[in-house]
């Protein structure tokens, strides 16, 4: 336990993030201060929103600093504790640096309740992605029984949860994703009424077929040409939960058809959000998700890579559409 | 009173509407049926939204039919009445055909109360444009004291009312328009804190200077590159009332920077609307506007062309930015 490794942002990507932007750096185990715990990293979550923090443009979260570790959702096990709140052996989650070992203030950690499900669910359906799906759909989308809900990125961690919650509310649900394996997952496992493979199908034609009564709710993780095809189908008073725009993240000055007219024609609402906007209501979201999960009304899938050095590849893979469900990297076994 | 004239849509414009799309056609005075009144047209309103009805794309209002009169907001005087509700001499408003004389069901007409102001205000500040400004700003924009409100098309019938209502609510108001005469009107007459001439100034730089604390509310009549410059300045939880997009109306497949990321970064809301969405609340809006007008807290301006044959030119002029305030055409004097 004498050596440590960290993954640093060494250059800000203009377009696709690649190997040249991230470096694995050898370091040492940090010392503990009062109130801190020493964590051994077990699982790291890679998420599309992290791409935004690699730029230095003004955004909703601070940019990552150059030559410092990337930070994001992760699970660790307490090795040593100078915090009253945690004991060695505890398994915790929080925003942690991409390092094998980290000393972190106990303030920012939450102990995982192993009775709720496998610990990894705290990074997925019972964590940020699940809450993102819940609040975006329920608060912005406000789905009503019989309405048509379209979900882009429907096989991802957030989208796959949105599809299921929309079905629980009696909606006609159409998922969009980029492979046969994903579209099968969306209809067969998640229970969507229809899935569109945007890499194979003519998306406007497929959407028109799948959404015979138009689109009432659009939960958008993707943006780009997929959204261009959804906008013309919006029904009067449609709601768009703008969660992500992964099609634009790596495209400087991404251009497309202007879309204001679609909102006017349908008196539609479009609302950007991040999960932190709902911090005051996390408990409510968490309770619903945990209950549905225990009742077997929700399911989830994880794509897991193994090994600390796989973190960059897992992250890059998000933009290649590699993952189904939550993309995780397993760094170490719990003791 | 034996002859009549009508303005027909004879060809659907793909881009700018011009003379070739509208024809003045001689006709005869229509006969009256039970429940109808024969109206002599006094004033015709030309409005940017009418451009949409000239296309045959699905929209929130039915397309105009080819070789039939255009229809829109107008004021007429009752010449003959087969309706219990109206007497000869009454001055009324409603959606009327672009004809010198029209027989219209009394159901769709409203008698103008001359005590509230000049009759033409029923097509402007006390009519559809005023209500559009009121509901878009108050219901979607929800301006709070001290917030920054940006208004595009700020010298137009809707925009000029928005500027004033925002000032009444203690906001820092920035208007955007396309001439010196308009920017003077916006600051000096309407009381905006700042006005930007988008034809002369570097809009992104001018906006940054005018909106030192970012943008909380954007009332957008215009879209296009002006909106592109506003989006990066949106504050957390900003609201965009998407009223119009005149920059796109005459541009088939108008392209521009994709804007979803801006909404995500600021958790901003963007809502399209048309005034008819607020039909149930027209009385509320009307009462506020009438009261402010009588208290001298609101003012308005009209641009008036004279003569039935000037209607097409007045309409085309909207897209050249000719008008300040409400663009009207005076067709005849009341008797």
Image (tube, coloured by chain):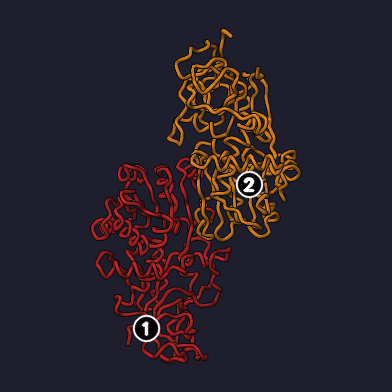
Chain colours: A red, B orange
Placement of the N terminus of chain A among the 4 image quadrants: bottom left
Q: Nearer the viewer, mark 1 or mark 2?
A: 2
Residue B155 is situated, as x and y percent measured from the top left of the image, at 67, 40
Residue at the spot of label 1: A91
Left or right, residue A305 beside residue A243? left
Q: Is residue A21 above or below residue B143?
A: below
At 60% from the left and 56% from the top, the residue drawn is: B216
Q: Can the viewer see residue A168?
A: yes
**Residue nearer the viewer, A187 or A216:** A216
Residue B73 is situated, as x and y percent measured from the top left of the image, at 56, 29
Q: What number of labels is visible?
A: 2
At 35% from the left and 63% from the top, the residue drawn is: A322
**Residue nearer the viewer, A9 or B305:** B305
Q: Is residue A142 above or below residue A267?
A: below
**Residue nearer the viewer, A234 or B171:** B171
Query: Pointer 2: residues within 10 angstroms few (<14), some, or many (20+)?
Result: many
Q: Secondary structure at mark 2?
A: strand
């Amino acid at each position: 336990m004498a050596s440590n490794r960290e993954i640093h942002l060494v250059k800000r990507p203009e377009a696709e993030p690649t190997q040249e932007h991230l470096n694995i750096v050898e370091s040492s185990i940090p010392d503990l201060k009062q109130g801190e715990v020493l964590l051994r990293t077990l699982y790291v979550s890679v998420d599309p929103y992290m791409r935004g923090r690699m730029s230095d443009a003004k955004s909703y979260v601070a940019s990552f600093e150059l030559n410092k570790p990337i930070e994001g959702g992760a699970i660790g096990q307490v090795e040593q504790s100078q915090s009253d709140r945690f004991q060695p052996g505890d398994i915790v989650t929080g925003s942690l640096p991409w390092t094998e070992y980290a000393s972190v203030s106990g303030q920012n950690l939450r102990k995982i309740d192993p009775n709720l499900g496998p610990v990894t669910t705290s990074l997925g359906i019972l964590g940020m992605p699940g809450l993102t799906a819940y609040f975006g759909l329920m608060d912005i989308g406000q789905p009503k029984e019989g309405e048509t809900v379209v979900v882009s990125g429907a096989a991802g961690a957030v989208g796959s949860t949105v599809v299921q919650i929309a079905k629980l509310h009696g909606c006609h649900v159409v998922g969009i994703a980029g492979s046969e394996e994903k579209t099968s997952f969306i209809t067969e496992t998640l229970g969507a009424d229809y899935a569109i493979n945007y890499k194979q199908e003519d998306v406007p034609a497929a959407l028109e077929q799948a959404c015979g009564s138009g689109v009432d709710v659009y939960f958008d993780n993707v943006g780009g040409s997929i959204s261009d095809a959804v906008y013309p189908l919006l029904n009067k008073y449609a709601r768009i939960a703008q969660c992500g725009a992964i099609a634009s993240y790596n495209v400087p000055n991404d251009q497309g058809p202007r879309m204001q007219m679609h909102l006017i024609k349908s008196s539609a609402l479009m609302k950007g959000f991040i999960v932190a906007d709902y911090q005051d209501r996390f408990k409510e979201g968490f309770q619903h998700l945990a209950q549905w999960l225990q009742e077997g009304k929700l399911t989830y899938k994880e794509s897991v890579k193994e090994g600390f050095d796989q973190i960059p590849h897992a992250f890059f893979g998000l933009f290649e559409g590699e993952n189904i469900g939550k993309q995780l990297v397993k760094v170490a076994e719990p003791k």
